[in-house]
Image (spheres, coloured by chain):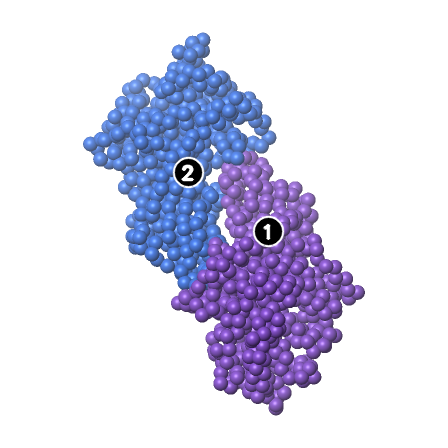
Chain colours: A purple, B blue
Amino acid sequence: MSQALQQNGHIKMVRHPYMLSKAQELIPDLWHHDILPHAIVSAQPDSQQIHGWRANVVNTRDEFFQHDLAQGEHVIIDFGQHCVGYLEFACEAVGSPPDAPAHLQFIFGETLPEVVEPFSEYNGWLSSSWLQQQDCYLDELPNRTRLPRRYCCRYLRINVVALSRKFQLRFTSLKLDTVTSASLANLPAYNSADHPLTRIDDVAVKTLKNCMQVVFEDGPKRDRRLWLGDLRLQALVNDVTVKNYALVKRCLYLFAAMTREDGMVSANIFVKPQVIADDTFLFDYALFFVDVLQEYVAATHDNATLADLWPVAWRQIELAMERVAENGIVRDSNDWWSFIDWHEDLNKQAASQGVLIYCLNKALELVRTYDSSKVTWLEAQIATLKSAALRELWDQKSGFFVSGSARQISCASQVWMVLADIGTPESQRQLLAKLQSHPPEIQMNTPYMMHHYVAALLQVNEREQATQEIKRYWGAMVEHGADTFWELFDPQRPDFSPYGSKLINSYCHAWSCTPSWFIRKYQL
Amino acid sequence: MSQALQQNGHIKMVRHPYMLSKAQELIPDLWHHDILPHAIVSAQPDSQQIHGWRANVVNTRDEFFQHDLAQGEHVIIDFGQHCVGYLEFACEAVGSPPDAPAHLQFIFGETLPEVVEPFSEYNGWLSSSWLQQQDCYLDELPNRTRLPRRYCCRYLRINVVALSRKFQLRFTSLKLDTVTSASLANLPAYNSADHPLTRIDDVAVKTLKNCMQVVFEDGPKRDRRLWLGDLRLQALVNDVTVKNYALVKRCLYLFAAMTREDGMVSANIFVKPQVIADDTFLFDYALFFVDVLQEYVAATHDNATLADLWPVAWRQIELAMERVAENGIVRDSNDWWSFIDWHEDLNKQAASQGVLIYCLNKALELVRTYDSSKVTWLEAQIATLKSAALRELWDQKSGFFVSGSARQISCASQVWMVLADIGTPESQRQLLAKLQSHPPEIQMNTPYMMHHYVAALLQVNEREQATQEIKRYWGAMVEHGADTFWELFDPQRPDFSPYGSKLINSYCHAWSCTPSWFIRKYQL
């Protein structure tokens, strides 16, 4: 997910040096792997392709390294897969000694449109600084260059903007030095007889891998940052794949390292040039600290970390409970207080109630063994919140939970009521079935929300439907050529972007990697 | 001067390792000096200004360092003087933690038009890669950056292309780390009562200084390269100012380090990433190797260097003499065989005849003490060439020397006949006077050609007219605001560029720095 428009420069933040030092001890080494060009392609407009362009192979890698480029020429390199890393290249002048700098422009695209639709026409509301490009002026040839920034691409366009009349340019080497903190060496094999699921698992694992850097990033193109909501889902997939628990632990400590004065954890963390918590705070994301910690401890039995971080987790519960009104429902507001989904019209109240109950349930699992003095209180709160939800939010007439003063009916509200375990298994199953038979106007926009829908289906043991949804949604991305899963995907609106331009969407996004968790955890 | 369109990739070049090693031993250390912003200016169109723009101060340096820049803003920094060096800056985010890279564009201009007239509209025939710009994407803030390329500017425009809605940008420091191999610490004082001449000398010395790097460069913006024709004039000014004879020696060895198979020296040399002689060969420039060597030995009495380089110098004479036809005149041709001046219509034959005789005279001075066996031969050749010039090129009717089959009359031909010492001092004086009273159509286009005109005037002892010409021509550049002298200046055509755009002209150019030599050598 991307940045909120919360601006809270006035809020006092508190650093916690012990937490920070624990986090910094765990900075991972990165694995490096060279990726060479797969082919040289041309881009043809093609309305049959989801993003409007088709790549045609026009040259091999070997032909590229023998080709002399003249001023005004360009090439599009297809690396054959989504990559995260550093571009290294060597080039030389062909002809007379180079009597002017060589001006090259590099444009990196996770998708083909990014390297063929001019960035100058971009008018989304996220900063255009995310569009990946670099102009290089090579004063000396032959030249060997490693661009200092990390890029994220499947396609690389090189525009030979200017040479001189006396020489041409030839690339003698070019590669991506790709990086990740995920080691696939120990990846547990997953071989289903179901080929589409196997392929979806491949793509999901690749998505996780490319997001795993010195933190779990949301997206390696954008925002390249640790968000709590993404971390939560990545940690699940990590648990059934590469099992880098040290990185999960590091990220938990990072959220604990700088909190709001009242102890609320930020929605996201910057780690360079120093660790800074963003001034964005989200009701749901803060609560998920409890969930991530619970899952981490369940997998590792790392009680030392639990001891360090439990007070932070508990504080998120206390703060969330302060938002519960007299009627037992979390107070709604019109600002960007809870995430839930990227949806302009979605009312977040009911779903946030669900998140709160869900996280209290996770806390309950922790305190049963760790701090039994809190069991009774938690059980009481959960009961109160559940009954309030049924009393205040259930709409008998429509057969759906409603949200906000306008009593909005959305998918998200129903899904989170199920995940909060409100009602009986049978009523939950019926509610989810009704989402299919009577789809509300407010649908789900992101793989993030789709994850919760599939999780709900599996919670009520609808394995077959869950599998179908995975194939229908994530499988469609694969059929559209994705080799990592996208931040945003609406089969009906392939150009959908909450940011105003598909060019700035992330096409390798943490929150989309969860099919591997479903497939492996539930043996689909 | 700039590149020729000679393309001689087929020519075999020979490396001379001894010469190269001598050159490399003499790589100079550079002097560093920090230059801070002088003021922040705005640019206003102003037809009264030679380049069409006027700078108005709008902020002080201190105000700049306290100003928060928003996306879309720009600033123009005036460093108050022409600088050659490396940009270093530090900046920080103001507001929320920076949630997107900062995209900055830096545009460097020796003149104001370079930072206000869009480079995208450039359509000159020299490579646009010379236009000085750099886009930077700062992933981390606060940030401290040193741009790796060397730039040449008085003005620096910073465009804040993209930030995010959550932060602004503030520069906390910014400077140019300027470099030169000229030490002004030991600059002999020159204080004339003639204030305009003193100012012209200041600007000329600055011009030399900014062109003195690890070689004598023609221009630090473009071509940043060692040209023999520029070296010759720089070495003269060096002799009366900063006296870095080691650098002159280094440059002579560089020309000797890689020659054409037949021994001809190239017109210019590249030194990075390795020493390579260009495949451009010019009749006049090759001969000037003799002149530079003679002047160097006269100043230093460095006979060891003379012993090393004399065979190279002598070879240039032999090769030039091969171009002398039966009638004693150098053969003309339509290609770019001799430089003389940047003038599309100029016929080079007569002037080249003059250059040949001039350089034979310089050789004669050398051989009198060094290789007396050649005196007789040289004297005979000079006599033959001079009489041939008078016989074949003098046009009694017009009272001018003519050049080429079309018998063209140009300033350049007359000037070089005088510098070749053809005729009597009185006839030479009359010829130069006639250039004033009856100006030929083919005038002088560059400070380079103007230098030779003033040198000719001083040769015939017209000190007052020489001084007037210096004030009229170079003084006008100073009045137009030059703080280094320009590659090209025609008071009648301020936009004149042989390259199709004033933006690509060099505004600190080696061949324009010679007023200091005249002023100091002749005590004007």
Q: Name the residue: 31% across, 51% down.
A: B61
- Which residue is outermost to the bottom? A397
Q: For the residue labelled by badge 1, is the local secondary structure a helix, a strand or a loop?
A: loop
Q: Above or below — where is B294 with respect to B11?
A: above
- Which residue is outermost to the right? A193
Q: Above or below — where is A261 with respect to B69?
A: below
Q: Position of residue A174 (x, y in %)?
A: 62, 45
Q: Are marks 1 and 2 in contact (CB under 8 Å)?
A: no
Q: Position of residue A122 (x, y in %)?
A: 52, 62
Q: Name the residue: 48% across, 69% down.
A: A264
Q: Name the residue: 62% across, 65% down.
A: A297
Which chain does the numbered disc 1 sit on? A
Question: Could you tell me how far apart the alpha carbons at marks 1 and 2 are, in whole angstroms?
Answer: 43 Å
Residue picked out by circle 1: A29
Amino acid at the residue labelled 2? Pro
Q: Position of residue B493 (x, y in %)?
A: 35, 42
Q: For the residue labelled by badge 2, is the local secondary structure a helix, a strand or a loop?
A: loop
Which chain does the numbered disc 2 sit on? B
Q: Nearer the viewer, mark 1 or mark 2?
A: 1
Q: Is residue A127 left or right of residue B473?
A: right
Residue picked out by circle 2: B220
- Residue B460: image quadrant is top left
Which image quarter holds the C terminus of chain A?
bottom right
- Which residue is outermost to the left? B193
Q: Above or below — where is B138 with respect to A323?
A: above
**Which of B325/A252 is in front?**
A252
Disc 1: CA contacts within 10 A as few (<14), some (14-19) or many (>=20): few
Q: Report if residue A475 is visible in the image.
A: no
**Which of B419/A202 is in front?**
A202
